[in-house]
């Protein structure tokens, strides 16, 4: 399981690096086209917004897998070993359930509705379902990470 997790971490980290690189290039192009060529690009604002959504949501899955997300650790630090482990298991289960219901099930519904209605982005003409696909994908990744963490305990 560790080898699979490392492979997923590698793919996810490289994907995030590529998306960030594309976002930087996109914003630089926007600045260049606006100030130097006096012909502002029409798609760059929208593209940077959607790339930021993907980076944020996929980044949340990546950080969740590394257990480096923001947390208030006052209570766990005060507990003894056994109650602390129980609390960690409870937190993993709550995160897993949130990922299942809100991200996977809710995300699939959002993707389905957007696809059914044929919604597209204004400037890019891209289906919104493709943009929203990151939500259930990230949810599945979080579920995988939390299940792996639970099986280790």
Image (spheres, rainbow, N blue to C red):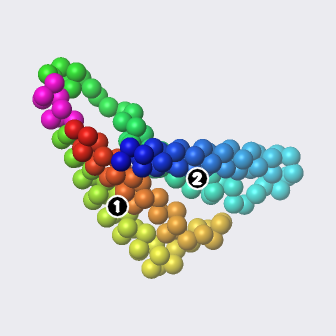
Pick the front one: 17 or 129? 17
**Horizontal and vertical percent for residue 138?**
42, 54
- Which SS type dominates the magenta stretch? helix
The magenta region covers 81-88
Whether residue 117 can be seen here: yes
Extreme residue in the right direction: 37
- Residue underneath mark 1: 104
- Distance from disc 2 to disc 1, alpha carbons, whole Å, reads 20 Å
Q: State yes or no: residue 31 in magenta.
A: no
Residue at 18% from the left image edge and 32% from the top image edge: 85
**Horizontal and vertical percent for residue 51?**
58, 53
Packing grade of label 2 (10 A; few <14, some 14-19, many >=20) is: some
- SS assignment at label 2: helix
Pick the front one: 145 or 99? 145
Above or below, 108 against 5 in this view is below
Above or below, 27 against 82 in this view is below
- SS assignment at label 1: helix
Whether residue 69 can be seen here: no
- Residue underneath mark 2: 51
Q: Earlier in the sequence, mark 2 or mark 1?
A: 2
Packing grade of label 1 (10 A; few <14, some 14-19, many >=20) is: many
**Horizontal and vertical percent for residue 52?**
55, 49
Task: Name the image quarter holding the C terminus.
Answer: top left
Residue at 83% from the left image edge and 56% from the top image edge: 39
Depth check, mark 2 against mark 1: the one in front is: 1
Residue at 63% from the left image edge and 57% from the top image edge: 47
Above or below, 39 against 110 in this view is above
Pick the front one: 122 or 2? 2
């Amino acid at each position: 399981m560790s080898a699979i997790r490392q492979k997923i971490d590698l793919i996810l980290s490289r994907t995030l690096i590529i998306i960030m690189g594309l976002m930087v290039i996109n914003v630089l192009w926007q600045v260049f086209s606006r100030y130097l060529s006096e012909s502002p690009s029409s798609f760059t604002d929208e593209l940077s917004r959607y790339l930021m959504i993907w980076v944020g949501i996929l980044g949340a899955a990546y950080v969740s897998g590394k257990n480096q997300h923001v947390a208030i650790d006052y209570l766990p630090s005060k507990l003894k070993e056994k109650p602390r482990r129980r609390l960690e298991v409870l937190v993993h289960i709550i995160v897993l359930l949130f990922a299942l219901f809100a991200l996977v099930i809710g995300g699939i519904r959002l993707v389905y509705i957007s696809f059914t209605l044929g919604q597209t982005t204004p400037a890019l003409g891209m289906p919104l379902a493709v943009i929203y696909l990151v939500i259930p994908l990230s949810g599945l990744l979080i579920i995988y990470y939390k299940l792996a963490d639970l099986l280790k305990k």
